[in-house]
Amino acid sequence: MPSVSHRKREILFKIVYYGPGLGGKTTNLEFIHAHSRPDRRGKLLSLNTAHERTLFFDLLPVDLGEFKGYEVRLHLCTVPGQIAYDRTRRLILRGVDGVVFVVDSQPAQLDANVESLENLAANLRRLGIEPNRTPVVVQYNKRDLDGVLDPVTLRGALGIPKNVPQLEASARYGKGVFETLKRIVRECLRVVGDPKELKEGRSPSILPGHRPSMYPDHLVDRHSDRDNDHSVTVPRAPGLPRTGRQ
Ligand SMILES: Nc1nc2c(ncn2[C@@H]2O[C@H](COP(=O)(O)OP(=O)(O)OP(=O)(O)O)[C@@H](O)[C@H]2O)c(=O)[nH]1
Ligand SMILES: [Mg+2]
């Protein structure tokens, strides 16, 4: 749900990096933090265990610049990927505008990716959010490692439809990190259209039309999928405001 203040001429998006434990969510945020202009970023706030696993969340505020006369601000958050922290994940997902699903491309992590994707759908549903109408970008991470599964195999195994934006990344080396961020912001802005038309305060981030489901059938609203009109034309994504990247 973008939060809009017409007085301040400001739109705030909450973007959540989701995915299996050790997939690279925190690494994405660390790279964005390290390569954003200090005057356009807030503090990277992390609550980690001694072993640097995310215990609660990471939060990074970023100012992007102007979009149609409104300042675009982001709250980038990650969830703890470890299975045990499901309640925390749900808490962090509340009011989400866009999801970056970080896939660990290593073959041994395939089941963990599938499980996390199912967990994302289930948690969105529990919060009353329709997963297939929530802006999402899939990032195939750890491309630098030997023996990783190729993106086509991953896409097939995870059941990601072609029209969901998908990018390759090596977050540890910063490859694909800003590209992923730009893409999810673009997806979020599609929902906005003209910021002047948005109501003051929070409003839900719901994509126009439906896309083919990227989640298991029993976890999404099949009835609304049946009504799916694939001929719906989604308005062209507006130009992206400049990022804070130096
Ligand atoms: N080789 C390689 N390692 C990566 C990459 N991205 C992350 N890593 C490493 O993977 C490990 C886990 O990364 P994190 O960013 O902490 O993973 P996370 O998804 O936040 O994990 P949780 O907080 O436990 O959910 C770290 O040692 C990272 O350096 C990558 O693209 N390539
Ligand atoms: Mg983490």
Image (tube, rainbow, N blue to C red):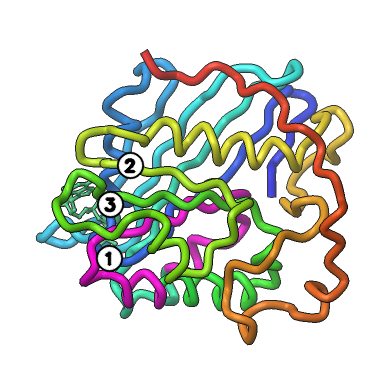
Dividing the image into 4 quarters, which one contains the C terminus? top left
**Residue at 72 percent of width and 59 percent of height:** 211
Can you say whether 1 is above or below 11 in the image?
Answer: below
**Residue at 67 percent of width and 77 percent of height:** 220
**Residue at 43 percent of width and 52 percent of height:** 17
Residue under pointer 1: 21
Callout 1: helix, strand or loop?
A: loop
Q: Earlier in the sequence, mark 1 or mark 2?
A: 1
Residue under pointer 3: 24
Which disc is residue 169 wearing? 2
Callout 3: helix, strand or loop?
A: loop
Residue type indicated by callout 3: Gly
Distance from label 1 to label 2 (Cα)? 17 Å
Q: Earlier in the sequence, mark 2 or mark 3?
A: 3
The image shows residue 224 at horizontal and vertical percentages of 82, 73
The image shows residue 9 at horizontal and vertical percentages of 73, 22
Residue type indicated by callout 1: Gly
Q: Which residues are magenta?
A: 89-115
Distance from label 2 to label 3 (Cα)? 10 Å
The image shows residue 19 at horizontal and vertical percentages of 38, 62
Residue type indicated by callout 2: Ala
